[in-house]
Amino acid sequence: MRVVSCNSFGPVSDLTVEHRPSVPVGPGQVRIRVTAAGVNFVDGLFVQGLYQIKPPVPFVPGGEVAGVVAEVGDGVTTHSVGDRVFCSTGLGGFASEVVWPARRVTHTPAGMTDGQAATFVQSYGTAWFALHHRARAHAGEWLLVLGAGGGVGLAAVDVGHAMGLHVIAAASSQEKRSIASAHGAEAEIDTSTEDVKSRAKELSGGGVHLVYDPVGGALAEAGLRSLRDDGQLLVVGFAAGEIPKLPA
């Protein structure tokens, strides 16, 4: 099989395409012929050695894939050869095939393309966990999404809207904000020209209940100051390149 290999920590331009022996399929596992793989911010961190977990090199990056079941192991009754599926792998996804436990592989809905399925788990899974499990958000609350034009931010807009939240999309370009509005945001903030704190408080009537922050950097403090009393700041990532440092 073909893989994209990280042989030493460094820039993604150093990744190489190599041929490796196929991995045997064990009991309870399936072999997936990969047709699409999601590329996420965290993949670049893994490759550069900047993530909090550093896998031993060489390794194959890639945290989520979609494809077709090519082989099933003993005891697998939930999947058959030819099924369209997707899954989160953590690592190993940038390959022509993946062997993974069947219980962690999901059938791809008929209305979803392989490309959509391969980029669904991490972004939407993160948004759902943050808003539903961590924040326990309730319909009618105000949610400010920073970086609303990115994959993780846009997923939060989508999930927040589906949960009945009033979503404010903050992004640096009109194109990104328009996409967020099409996914359910009812208000926008231009982070390149507007004061995030004052605008968010104006839109929400005194402050938002929740801030979803995958950006970090200077925007994190602006998001914090946008909250009303007892509000929650959900720190999801630092796409700006700087881990947030908030004043005490």
Image: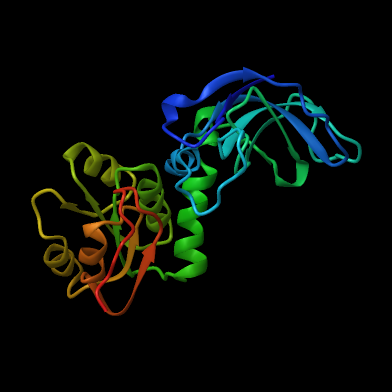
Q: Position of residue 102 (x, y in %)?
A: 77, 41
224 sits to left or right of 153: left
Q: Position of residue 132 (x, y in %)?
A: 49, 65
Q: Residue at x 21, y 73 (%)?
A: 207
Residue 25 in picture, x, y percent from top left: 83, 32
Q: Is residue 94 above or below residue 212?
A: above
| Residue 117 coordinates in the image, percent (x, y) | 55, 35
Q: How is the image coloured?
A: rainbow
Q: Tell me the quarter of the picture where residue 145 sits.
A: bottom left
In the foreground, 5 or 189: 5
Q: In the rendered image, which quarter contains the C terminus?
A: bottom left
| Quarter placement of the N terminus | top right
In the displayed structure, would residue 116 be above or below residue 46? above
Q: Which residue reaches farthest front?
A: 8
The one nearer the camera, 61 or 10, is 10
Residue 197, image quadrant: bottom left
Left or right relative to 3: residue 195: left
Query: Left or right of 15: which side holds 165?
Result: left
Q: Residue shown at 60%/31% (left/top)?
A: 66
Kindly give the residue lying farthest to the left in the view shown.
193
Residue at 42%, 69% (x, y): give it: 137
